[in-house]
Image (cartoon, grey):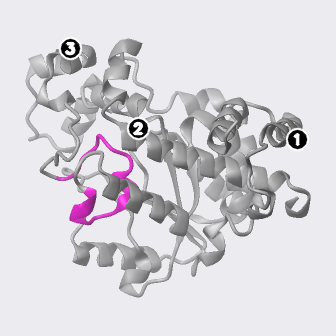
């Protein structure tokens, strides 16, 4: 079995597993991994895998991706701010939410976040901002990702949910309501009919404030190179940002691993996160839940997935990185 095949097997088995069972899974992992590099275990060093040590200020910057459980995660951070004594800040609701910023706006954002008295957390829907480019101290970057096809389905129905427009109308009364036919159109019809909204073409660029089809855009950054859909260049930039800057990128489908890694890699802010979450899991899982989202057939999902190859690769990259970070915590010299 190749290394990649072995890691995929390990990743699937790890999801949802309790922490007490992980050591036994590790034994199985290494016994299967005849093709692993001889020095692979040496590379699983928790310190080397933790970019928190590069941070120049005790401020967490959570540039949250939409529809990955980020509102739940934001509420968890709000709770933890009371428990762990840090300040919680978030961006206010905007009429038009711009996720890609001009250099001057990036600098203003970095300056504002850097001015917070540490320890502090700041939360905003925005693409990755490299603070050091503007001579600002590097914060502790964290984020979440989700299966990209499930996420794009969630986004499709989120912007059609009745309560979404009620909230928008309350905040901005002059916003016009959308066409009822658009609101009623289901995702399967949109895909099978080939509507522009549901065509995911490589290299295509969406004009306007941002491309919410892709979570990799939130890691790639603000460059024009990041805007074409499903391209190798955007993928590699996003991977590089995760590797070089992010302390933890969690996985919505594997919250056990996500919370455990956050507690160990960013303990100042996430101490007790698992207990806080699981003690009130029913409350957390109800946050921003969309009851108006109908099921989508696997056949339609497969059609979409065929055009999301780089998004799927990015998701798997983040998932494997998270699992390496968790593995490193289980090694004798990193306990």
**Residue denoted by label 1:** 23
Crowd tier of the residue under label 1, counting other residues whose Cα lies within 10 Å: few below 14, some 14–19, many 20 or above: few
Q: Secondary structure at mark 2?
A: loop
Q: Answer with left or right where residue 282 lies relative to residue 91.
A: right
Write the residue at 19% across / 50% down.
95
Please give the range of residues in magenta.
209-226
- Between residue 271 and residue 103, name the one nearer to us: 103
State the CA–CA distance, disc 3 to disc 1.
46 Å
Q: Is residue 3 above or below residue 269?
A: above
Q: Nearer the viewer, mark 2 or mark 1?
A: 1
Q: Are marks 3 and 2 in contact (CB under 8 Å)?
A: no
Q: How many marks?
A: 3
**Residue denoted by label 2:** 67
Crowd tier of the residue under label 3, counting other residues whose Cα lies within 10 Å: few below 14, some 14–19, many 20 or above: few
Q: Answer with left or right where residue 172 lies relative to residue 128.
A: left
State the residue lying farthest toward the bottom. 135
**Residue denoted by label 3:** 189
x, y percent for residue 102? 21, 71
Write the residue at 67% across / 66% down.
50
- Between residue 185 and residue 42, name the one nearer to us: 42
Write the residue at 86% across / 34% down.
21
The reply to whether residue 125 is in sight is: no
x, y percent for residue 97? 24, 52
Q: Nearer the viewer, mark 3 or mark 1?
A: 1
Which of the two discs, 2 and 1, labels the residue nearer the N terminus?
1
Q: Nearer the viewer, mark 3 or mark 2?
A: 3
Q: Answer with left or right where residue 315 lies relative to residue 55.
A: left
- Between residue 254 and residue 285, name the one nearer to us: 254
x, y percent for residue 25? 83, 36
Which of the two discs, 3 and 1, labels the residue nearer the N terminus?
1
Which of the two discs, 3 and 2, labels the residue nearer the N terminus?
2
């Amino acid at each position: 079995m190749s290394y990649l095949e072995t890691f995929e097997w390990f990743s699937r088995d790890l999801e949802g597993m309790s922490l007490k069972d992980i050591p036994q899974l590790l034994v199985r992992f290494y016994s299967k991994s005849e093709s692993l590099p001889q020095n692979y275990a040496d590379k699983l060093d928790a310190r080397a895998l933790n970019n928190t040590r590069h941070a120049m200020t005790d401020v967490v910057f959570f540039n949250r991706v939409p529809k990955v459980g980020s509102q739940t995660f934001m509420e968890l951070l709000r709770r933890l701010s009371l428990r762990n004594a840090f300040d919680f800040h978030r961006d206010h609701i905007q009429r038009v939410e711009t996720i890609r910023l001009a250099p001057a706006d990036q600098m203003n954002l970095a300056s504002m976040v850097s001015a917070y008295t540490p320890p502090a957390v700041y939360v905003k829907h925005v693409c990755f901002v490299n603070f050091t480019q503007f001579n600002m101290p590097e914060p502790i970057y964290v984020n979440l990702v989700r299966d990209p096809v499930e996420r794009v389905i969630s986004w499709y129905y989120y912007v059609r949910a009745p309560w979404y427009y009620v909230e928008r109308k309350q905040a901005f009364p002059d916003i016009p309501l959308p066409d009822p036919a658009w609101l009623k159109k289901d995702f399967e019809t949109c895909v099978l009919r080939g509507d522009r909204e549901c065509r995911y073409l490589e290299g295509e660029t969406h004009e306007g404030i941002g491309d919410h089809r892709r979570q990799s855009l939130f890691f790639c950054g603000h460059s024009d190179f990041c805007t074409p859909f499903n391209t190798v260049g955007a993928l590699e930039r996003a991977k590089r940002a995760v590797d070089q800057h992010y302390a933890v990128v969690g996985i919505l489908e594997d919250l056990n691993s996500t919370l455990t890694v956050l507690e160990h890699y960013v303990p100042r802010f996430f101490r007790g996160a698992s207990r806080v979450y699981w003690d009130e899991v029913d409350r957390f899982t109800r946050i921003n839940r969309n009851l108006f989202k109908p099921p989508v057939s696997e056949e339609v999902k497969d059609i979409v997935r065929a055009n999301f190859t780089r998004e799927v690769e990015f998701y798997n990259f983040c998932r494997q990185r998270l699992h390496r970070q968790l593995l490193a915590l289980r090694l004798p010299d990193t306990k």
